Amino acid sequence: MSRARRKVDHIQHAVQTGQSRSHGFEDIQFIHQSLPNLSVHDISIASKIGELSLSSPIIINAMTGGGGKETAEINQQLASVAKECGLAMAVGSQMSALKDPSECFSYEVVRKENPNGIIFSNLGSEATVEQAKRALEMIEADGLQIHLNVVQELVMPEGDRDFTGALKRIEQIVNSVGVPVIIKEVGYGMSKETAKRLSEIGVSIIDVGGFGGTNFSKIENERRQRRLQFFDDWGIPTTVSLVEVVSSAPTLTVIASGGIMNALDVVKSIRLGASGVGMAGYFLKLLVQKGVLSVIEEVHDIHEDIKYLMVALGKKDIQALKEAPIIMKGATHHWLSERGIITKNI
């Protein structure tokens, strides 16, 4: 199967399989504040990812590109949402365009649609410094996502089977490209051990990509004759991954993603230490089923709901929100306790 055809298949399977919502946010309970001394008009949802200032913590996370006209149209539509709502946006892996320049247009459309927006390039950990620079130039990107997708590759019939040297390649890219580099999981979560190793080589931004959202094992298993179903439930839930990363590498800027679909998920992510929140599968399904205007309306509603929640917590900005009192319970509490993390200190 061609790489372009595979990209289109991924979109179709992602919409069909949906999101499991096994992310752990149900285990995070806020403590209501009866005297917030705030107005909704006082609230700021502006945030920062590394050196980049964002008007919203929401990021349209990497989805597609490299699958011809169909993926170009999706990227154009997502870019129009990003422009209208003031969101940062990442494209899907650009390796297909680096190997087949005829696919460049399916990524370049994002910058054409949103010439002044914050846009992230995207490549896998197999990429070289030269490829990273070409990907950035292709869309005049403000930063680069490097995705880690070992399980997806293992389940993918035509996927990679050799993952040696990834950390060294990441280090070389971080030291060479001159823009923020985000290391991103794709649905299996980032452990504290991984976060520490990345921090030690100079990585400053991590997207945890936790379990609970789009399940690439299930997607790739749809394309296999002999299914590897043991990977369908594999991974670290989003809440757990957030706390593991933040507690083990406190100097990192952290992005939450993995099954996030509403304002409460966003606010809980920020409370657990995230400075940005990636949303992909939820927006994709809404876009495919209801169109661009529905996605724009949903983003505006989420922004409004975030402000309502922040008032109820008495927190006027993103930094203050990270100090809101919470109770942690259930499987998230148990997992973190087993991993030696004292949840009362979070």
Image: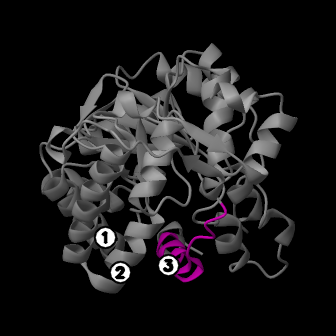
Q: Amino acid at mark 2?
A: Val
Mark 2 or 1, closer to the camera? 2
Q: Which residue is mark 1?
A: 74
Q: Amino acid at mark 3?
A: Val
Classify 82 as above or below 144.
below
Q: Secondary structure at mark 3?
A: helix
Image quarter (top left, top right, bottom left or bottom right) of the C terminus: top right
User: Which of the pair 100/298 is nearer the observer?
Assistant: 298
Q: Earlier in the sequence, mark 2 or mark 1?
A: 1
Q: Are marks 2 and 3 in contact (CB under 8 Å)?
A: yes
Q: Which residue is mark 3?
A: 15
Classify 18 as above or below 131.
below
Q: Are marks 1 and 3 in contact (CB under 8 Å)?
A: no
Q: Mark 2 to mark 3: distance in Å?
A: 8 Å
Q: Is residue 32 left or right of residue 57?
A: right
Numbered label attached to residue 137: none
Image-quadrant location for residue 226: bottom right
Q: Position of residue 86 (x, y in %)?
A: 19, 49
Residue 62 at least partly seen = no
Picture residue at 52% right of the left edge, 50% below the top: 257
